[in-house]
Amino acid sequence: MRFGVVRFPGSCDEVDALLACRRFGEADLLWHKDRDLDGVDAVVVPGGFSYGDYLRAGAIARFSPLMESVIEFAREGGPVLGICNGFQVLCEAGLLPGALLTNRSLRFVCRQVDIVVENPDTPFTRACAQDELLSVPVKHTTGRYYAPGVPEEQVVLRYAPGHNPNGAQDDIAGVCNAAGNVLGLMPHPEHAVDPLTGSADGGRLFESLAMAPVA
Amino acid sequence: MRVRVLIRPKEGILDPVGQTVEGALPALGFEGVRNVHVGRLIELDVEDAAEVPAMCERLLANPLIEDYEITSAGHPAPRPDGDDRPPAVRDRV
């Protein structure tokens, strides 16, 4: 498995994402101005403040040359994982339903939360058990997920009761597209891959992607 | 021509910024204020105003969460160098 991790101007979690991927496979950075995905098997759109998050989070990044290729890659069924700002970019790109709004509290939140695996039948969660609890950090101001009418089977991850940090609709922490090959989530699995930092649960998502698909 | 785009949160979407402003006004003695919503204003000079709705749909607003309203703001903003010729004429030089 070879991962490609996107780097936009303003990305800040791309190196952690790169190192998380390298625990389970090969990984390289992809530059936002390139159009070539360099033959990677999966794309990670990391967290940060792409293009300064001007106008709306992810609104400008969505039109970068590399994203055009990522959108094509996703439409052809390639796995794409968007984390935090990456989730916002994928929503703006129309690869995922819904949008991210300012946290209900209007405050930046930075804390460890528990999330529940609602759907283990995706390329991102197949190493997990149904209802498995993962402890991962969140850190964002614009994370209130809003998607009227999103189908229940596309809800892959949900904040555990009492852990919703932002007022997201139905406690949704992570959502996939109808085909199941694109996942966006606000929590940061790439910051939870080593017991040294309190939890290695985030590795389960990268491990899932690196697993051979079940035929 | 000068165009103004007003962007506001769609009705029914929780608007904590509006709520916070609404909550702050009574503290200053302004009573009876309701339904406060905070949006943004984008002003732009365009050659073809017919393109502005597409700009709104694709970039300026996110139609899932925001409503937009396009209004004309009259004449283009004056340039700092005082050159008031139309852009098509100015750029030919």
Image (tube, coloured by chain):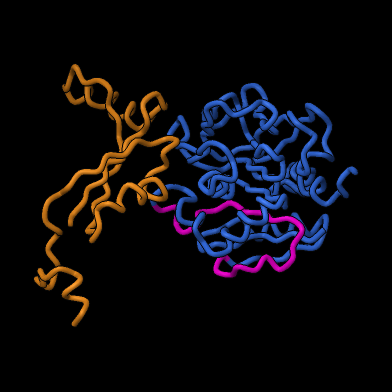
Chain colours: A blue, B orange
State the image quarter where residue A4 is shown: bottom right
Q: Residue at x 25, y 58 (%)?
A: B48
* Magenta stretch prevailing secondary structure: loop
Left or right for B92, reference A127: left
Residue at the farthest bottom position: B93
Above or below, comparing residue A206 to residue A105 in the picture: below
Q: Quadrant of the C terminus of chain A?
A: top right
Query: What residue is shown at x 63% (from left), y 56% (from top)?
Result: A72
Q: Quadrant of the N terminus of chain A?
A: bottom right
In percent of width and height, residue B16 lies at 38, 29
Measured as percent of width and height from the top left, residue B72 is found at 17, 47
Instruction: Give x and y (percent) for residue A164.
Output: 59, 28
Q: Does the magenta run of residues contain B53?
A: no
Q: Residue at x 60, y 38 (%)?
A: A111
Q: Nearer the viewer, residue B25 or A206?
A: A206
Q: Which residues are magenta?
A: A32-54
Q: Is residue A100 left or right of residue B43?
A: right
Q: Is residue A61 visible?
A: yes
